[in-house]
Image: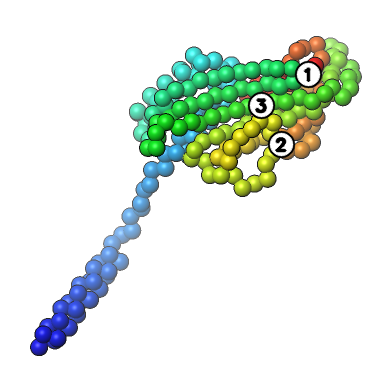
Amino acid sequence: MPRRKGQFALLGVIVLAALLVLAASRRDPEPAYVVQRGQMQSAQLVNLARACMAAGCSNDTLAALVQDLLARNQSSNLFMYPVLDAYYKGNVSSTRAVDHVSFTIQTLRGPEAVEVVVVAQAGFVLNTFSKSYHGVTYILKNTTLTYCHVYTSPFFPPQQNTPLPCPVTYGANAVVYCPRIYDPNGVAEIRQIGPCTWAVAVPGNYRDYTLRDEFYVPVKVVVP
């Protein structure tokens, strides 16, 4: 008799489980939502850094853009991590121009960095030639330009692709991007010859000549 009672109890459990499965199968499916904060926030900050550079970045400009973004976060529920700090630094040397924006965000792991580095590295002058444009004659310097953006975030997955020829040091959690470049003045001659690499000829009567990329970020070509 105890054995039979145990069998009835087991049968009751099986029937109950079957009824629950049947009831669940008759319910309308409901979507499940997961809030992904890390990569989306990093992308927002990358876009903000590029906008700052395009506008002529300074620490005051950067701070104003960050405040605007955080205000939008409050009103639109963007699920942003707090931005603890942001700074901009630009540097032009004999053949290189570098713009660097760094953010410190408060994640669940603690303070972490999101960085955007834009670098333009010019080579030696190969030759010079004259060019007339809109009635003005320019002496153009022909050189090779390496130009790239590097976006680094603790939330970006390690990159498995072949490294691009970007002349800065970066870690595994970095995305390297080679934007299109152009001359808004129409004077320079530009031809892409490889990943992140262009043959450019720019007017030689400037210490550096500024092109623009597809985000309107300045591309300073510094030639000796």
Mark 2 residue crowding within 10 angstroms, few (<14) / some (14–19) / many (20+): some
Q: Quadrant of residue 57?
A: top right
Q: Earlier in the sequence, mark 3 or mark 2?
A: 3
Residue assigned mark 3 = 119
Query: Disc 2, disc 1: CB below 8 Å?
Result: no
Residue drawn where x is 66% and y is 30% of the image: 168
Residue that lies at the very extreme toward the left in this rendered image:
1
Q: How is the image coloured?
A: rainbow
As displayed, is residue 165 above or below residue 86?
below
Q: Position of residue 218 (x, y in %)?
A: 65, 21
Residue assigned mark 1 = 223
**Camera-side residue: 191 or 154?**
154
Please state which amino acid type lies under the numbered disc 3. Answer: Val
Taking the image as drawn, is residue 209 in sight?
Answer: no
Spatial CA distance of label 3 from label 1 is 14 Å
Please state which amino acid type lies under the numbered disc 1. Answer: Val
Q: Position of residue 78 (x, y in %)?
A: 39, 34
Spatial CA distance of label 2 from label 1 is 19 Å
Residue assigned mark 2 = 165
Element carrying mark 1: loop
Q: Quadrant of the N terminus?
A: bottom left
Q: Earlier in the sequence, mark 2 or mark 1?
A: 2
Q: Position of residue 20 (x, y in %)?
A: 23, 68
Q: Quadrant of residue 209?
A: top right
Element carrying mark 2: loop
Tell me: 213 left or right of 172.
Answer: right
Q: Earlier in the sequence, mark 3 or mark 1?
A: 3
Element carrying mark 3: strand
Residue drawn where x is 42% and y is 31% of the image: 111
Spatial CA distance of label 3 from label 2 is 11 Å
Residue drawn where x is 50% and y is 31% of the image: 114
